[in-house]
Amino acid sequence: MQQTQFSPMQKIYLPIKRFIDIFLSLLGIIFLSPLFIILCIAIKVDSRGAIFFKQKRVGIDKKTFMMYKFRTMRIDTPKDMPTHLLTNPEQYITKVGKILRKTSLDELPQIFNILKGDMSIIGPRPALWNQDDLIAERDKYGANDVRPGLSGWAQINGRDELEIPVKARLDGEYVRRLGFLFDLRCFFGTVFSVLRQDGVVEGGTGEMKKNHRVLILVNLDITIYKFRKELVERLIQEGYEVYISSPYGEFIDVFTEMGCKFIDTKVERHGKNPMKDYQLYRRYVSIIKEVNPVVVLSYTIKPNIYGGMATAKCKVPFIPNITGLGSAVQKSGILLSLVTVMYRTAFRKVHCVFVQNKENQNYFSSHNIAVGKYRLIPGSGVNLNHYIVRPYKEDHGIHFAFIGRVMREKGIEEYLEAAYALKKEYSNIYFHVYGFCEEAYEDRLKKLQEQGVIQYHGMVKDMAEVFETINCSVLPSYHEGMANSLLEAAASGRPVIASNITGCRETFDEGVSGFGFQVKDSRALIGALRKFLSLTTEERQQMGLAGRKKVETEFDRNIVINAYINEIEHISKGVK
């Protein structure tokens, strides 16, 4: 037990504090008497039993006293048991009792306890006589050495949602900072908390998590399936309800079977119609108000921007993930200025921003967007249990693979040019394409496949086993947050060849686990491919194993999941 040593100023203040308690409690009794009468009548009319409720509580120096409250529960409620230990406490609370608890008016009769000297206006809330866990925790901080209060520092920093160790620590902080100005801060903080009805949960101490809901905004179901499935699983394990807002797709069924709630939301990913975008913003506002989540997570540009605007309006904590900034920020002019303003507006009240590379972080910082709120994470990470090292074979030639959306900005033009050129030089090499094909490239891929230049496999649900059939992953992308396809290839023991840009270069060590080349330069890509082909089979295999070691050290998906859980826990407990 820690014995409290009050400072000289605190010793002077304590008798003044007692005088203030007597004076204000007398005024309260006089001026609030009409309200007392109204509440007494309401309680009596609403349910059978006494108007007042007396309960044995722990006071200064752990001496017990009888604390007064307006009765808010039925007379058959188990005696001397904290609300949070009751099974389904809602069943015992009366109709008037619910109103009294939400407004904290049930505490008014404690004015008489203050007048008697059992309590103070401000101080740690009095524990029940049998709440040994809370009393013991408070002993560690000397919080049992002052009069308990009608409200206090812990009350305005979480109230019922705080777990006992956190509540006791805050009570100890109150004792340490005890003084007139700090009491004033607690007093006015209580007024605002009551008006907002902060932290009130039927079920009491530390029980808020049961009711916590996490809303995830994405523009495509595969986005959350391929890269965030493990995060969703972890959130469910931690006791959160998970809501997913996305256009419907085949992977949504996987999440509903896990227990997630699906909200069908149309997102025009490449659309530039301002009315459609405004409708998306309004849709997000409506969803957030309906779900009432503890936090909103988002991925990709439109969910990040319009989700950020919606959460700011609804005053809900927001954690966007910058998976890449897109082509707009690669250019200058009106479009760049517009995107920058939109990000600045969307992220003005953001809790934190997960960024996947330093270049993206520098862009936000240099444009005064969410300054100081960045968290650098290793992309989406890789599930190392799912992507295991596959046997490396060249029995049937050397197979290269482009894995990603078939679109210009992913470097498909350079890849196809390189394939066309090298197929003329080498007879034992093969070029594969995996991923959803944009309409503009459908005919071209079909023609090149007929010519034997490439093999197009469409979008593959799970690439893990496919890596056994390929020898090297190639990504000539123009911009990336962090290239997941390269990380998955490296985790599977495959060398990578990629454009030398932020989001790609971090995934390999030059000449050790892969090769880089100048972005938007098909000749440079051909040179890198030739360099790879000049190696021996054993050298190529060793490059792949070096990539696996790098991913294990730097890109384990658990690093990303833990970063999310930590931030969400901070939000749940009110930690800034």
Image: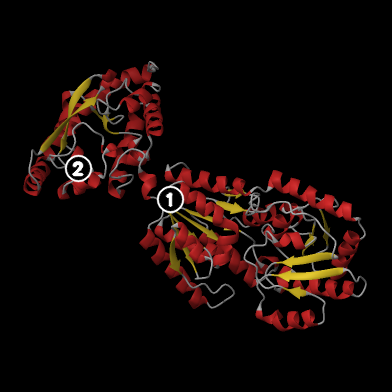
- The furthest residue to the front: 395
Q: Which mark is residue 105?
A: 2
Looking at the rendered structure, the secondary structure element under dot 2 is helix
Look at label 2 and name its amino acid. Answer: Leu
Look at label 1 and name its amino acid. Answer: Tyr
Looking at the rendered structure, the secondary structure element under dot 1 is loop
In the figure, 455 relative to 113: above or below? below
Label 2 neighbour load within 10 Å: few <14, some 14-19, many 20+? some
Quadrant in the rendering for residue 420: bottom right
Tell me residue 468's x, y (percent).
Answer: 74, 59
| Residue in view at x 11 percent, y 41 percent | 36
| Residue in view at x 52 percent, y 43 percent | 566
Tell me residue 17's x, y (percent).
Answer: 27, 25
Tell me residue 206's x, y (percent).
Answer: 36, 39
Residue matched to label 1: 240
Q: Quadrant of the N terminus?
A: top left
Tell me residue 525's x, y (percent).
Answer: 84, 66
Quadrant in the rendering for residue 170: top left
Question: In the image, 246: left or right of 468?
Answer: left
Label 1 neighbour load within 10 Å: few <14, some 14-19, many 20+? many
In the figure, 396 relative to 456: above or below? above
In the figure, 498 relative to 457: above or below? above
Q: Is residue 506 visible?
A: yes
